[in-house]
Image (cartoon, rainbow, N blue to C red):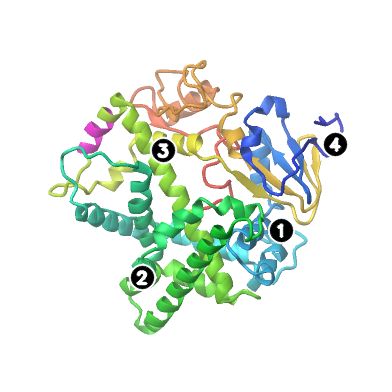
Amino acid sequence: MEYPSSNKSRGQKIDYPLLGFDQYSYHGADNSRLGRAATRVALLNDDLYVVHGAKNVAEIFRNPSVGVAPAYGIALKHCFGMSRKAAQTYFADTSGSRPQPIWGSNVHPRNRVMYRTHENLLQGLLGSGLAPATDRFEHYWTDHLCSMDISSHWVEYPDLLEFFEANLGKMVIQTIFGPALLSQSPGFVRDMWAFDQVVMSLAKRLPSICIPQAYIVRRRLFQYVKRWHAFAKASSPRAEDVREDDINSFWGSKTIRERYEMLLDVESQDQDSVASTDLGFIWAAVTNVVPSAMTLTLQVCQDTTLRSELREDLAQMIEPNCRLKFDLKKLEKHALLLSMYAETLRFGVQIHVPRNAPHADIAVGNVQIPQSKLMVMSTWLAHTDETVWNTKKGSHPLDGFWPQRFLVDLKDPSSGPTKEGYGICDKAMKTHGECGDAFFSTEGLEGAWIPFGGRGIGLP
């Protein structure tokens, strides 16, 4: 391992002779041992840089000259079966995901695939489409739970994760992509989870002779998505006759139909490439939500005090005359639930978030990262950085789940998510006053808490 000198350097180096990359190779290290800027990892075919330290990570996310398109192109080509020609559009998009293209880029506006994709999903899942999507999920999930005939008696289930995959996963797909996808391909959910077990083998670029089942299940899912696209396109009403309910039935939402049309408008994209892209989107949506929900549920079930407190609070939020419908306005303001959700994303999300600077070298601390080199931010390193996170002097270590980690109690200066609890409290006093209940806060965590893929380019 080579440590950087006092001048700008290429960063400390770790030889890692594999085509894939695994965050668990870093579990024997920590931020202090790795240094505070970037670690260069030598792969067989190239180098990549692991950026660590909250300040450095935050600078990467804020930097307008940084994009993510090549990493998407790699994933779409190797994991989701996109053709080399179609994937080249992503490799060639050096304009970034922000409205203003990265300086030095000359990508035609039509081919700014990352920006157009990001804006579509931003509006559809966080903007004007958020409330309708929430309503759809609540409707589908409530109806599904009622149809399961769940009694008041405890029933032993052989595999709780399987229950979440088959039921919650199905409802997430139906909410975002509509019921037509599943009605046209009843085996989709089963095959999606089979694919999830082998997708990392595809990421390592192993040939089909080594992992035939991975290629078989991916091909089957690819055909499901193409079938859905064809059915939805043929069944959708004309634009002048369109009703929101019709769009939801076939496409899930207006956002997904517009996404389909937008992707086809991009140069070198066709029905096959859009199917690969949507397969990746579906997989990412389901395999993020379901494991996170499962993690949160397990933590609640294992803590009897927490479970009792939540049950008492949630009982006050049930809508009259409907035991499965909650007041969502109250739910989304419940401080402990918000803290538990944030802690789930800290504790349970372990990925590498990719970035690159396509038009210039980039300085990260005392390390100079060459133009176009892949940079990754390890959420595991960020989420276990003891120089940032509050552990209450070790009583709540970062390798464990602490439901109240993101709660600030103005009467307790040692509360809050960061070690610098006093600073948070001083700022919070101006807004919340001296008394009152504990409140949810992520103040002071920029670059240390990376729940949705990072600032500016992250997934909604």
Q: Which residues are magenta?
A: 309-315
Q: From this viewpoint, is residue 460 visible?
A: no
Which badge, 1 or 4, is on the more N-terminal residue?
Answer: 4
Q: Badge 1 is on which residue? A: 102
**Residue placed furthest toward the left:** 321
Foreground mark, 1 or 4?
A: 4
Q: In the rendered structure, find residue 8 and report the number of the disc placed on it.
A: 4
Q: Is residue 69 magenta?
A: no
**Disc 1 residue type (three-letter):** Ile
Location of residue 394 with respect to 133 vertically, above or below: above
Which quadrant holds residue 100? bottom right
Residue at 34%, 42% in the rendered image = 160
> Circles 2 and 3: CB distance less than 8 Å?
no
Alpha carbons under labels 4 and 2: distance apart: 55 Å
SS state under label 3: helix
The image shows residue 459, relative to residue 255, as above or below, that is above
Residue 324, placed above or below residue 274: above
What kind of residue is marked 2?
Answer: Ala
Q: Which mark is residue 295?
A: 3
Identity, as a three-letter code, of the amino acid under mark 3: Thr
Say which residue label 2 marks.
180
